[in-house]
Amino acid sequence: MVSGCKLYTMQAAAPSAASAPAATPPASSSATKWKAVEEFGYAWKPGQTPVHFKLELPDGYEDPGDFTRIHIQVKGQPEFVLDNQDGWIAYNSQEQQSDVYAKLGKRNLVQSRFVLILPDSTRAGEPPLVFLRSWVYASDAERLHVIGFKSSGGPITLLNTELDLEEVTDLDGDGHPEIIGSPCMSEESAPGVLTYDPYHVYQAPHPITEPAKLSVELSKAYNLKHYYGWAGPDCSEKLAVVLHPPSGGKPVIMDTVEAKKLMKQAPSKKK
């Protein structure tokens, strides 16, 4: 983590919004000299001309991040170029260690330190998903970019938002995985009282024609199973999770002001 905060060059998608994510603007002018960090090809079906991936970093770059630009060239399609001023990092970074990425890395379809490519279908020969993990600044959640491929073969940015990845798994049984993560950093507003920060579940359309969207239905089901409950998709400091209610029982979600009053009124434990 780095102290201070580096402003994003695009507006983060609101937690409950289903609008398309904006692409990160170019990190530099056309006069910038670039150096290749990594290049590789990958074909997901027999006889296909490998899709060419190229990761770049501008000369003289001194901020955190292993690369800031990715090129994806699919035969017969315009070159896809995406920039990220935050800087992308190795998906299994030692500076930002993550059990989730370590686990997903075992499923990576390519030999790359930086790009995590995972299947987007249980059927062989289907286009994959490309995951790019950003450097974290201050107390924000990580910025996650996910790239998919249209039926034409052309790449498309499916996701560009702050999201600490939790899982990539098929929740609704349609043969395609959902992208699950935490959009907010949980904070303790009082002893035993946490801010309300639910998981978000994103779905991409199949065939892919547009960016992934937040599924409120799947988010609710996932939170009821894996979180403390459900009070809507938006992170909120006005709502709190009381981990150990004075009356006993499971954690409860309630108004923050009332939660703090409740915990103040709770009898102290005898030593």
Image: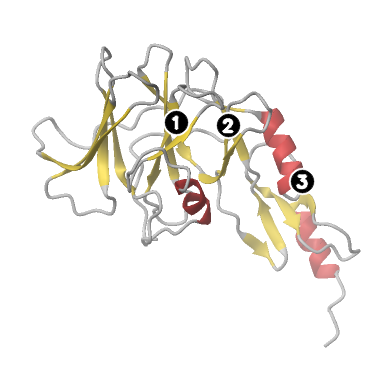
Whole-number angstrom distance, CA of label 2 to CA of label 1: 10 Å
**Residue at the image point whose x is 69% and y is 31% from the top:** 218
Left-right relation of 137 to 102: left
For the C terminus, the image quarter is bottom right
Point out the frontmost of discs 3 and 2: 2
Does the CB distance between marks 3 and 1 fall below 8 Å? no
Whole-number angstrom distance, CA of label 3 to CA of label 2: 23 Å
Q: Is residue 232 visible?
A: no
Give the farthest residue toward the bottom.
271
Left-right relation of 155 to 77: right
Mark 2 closeness class: few <14, some 14–19, many ≥20 residues within 10 Å: many
Point out the frontmost of discs 3 and 1: 1
* Quadrant of res 30: top left
Does the CB distance between marks 2 and 1 fall below 8 Å? yes
**Residue at the image point whose x is 71% and y is 42% from the top:** 223
Numbered label attached to residue 177? 2
Q: Amino acid at mark 3?
A: Gly
Residue named by callout 1: 129
Task: Give the SS element for disc 2.
Answer: loop
Count the labels in the image.
3
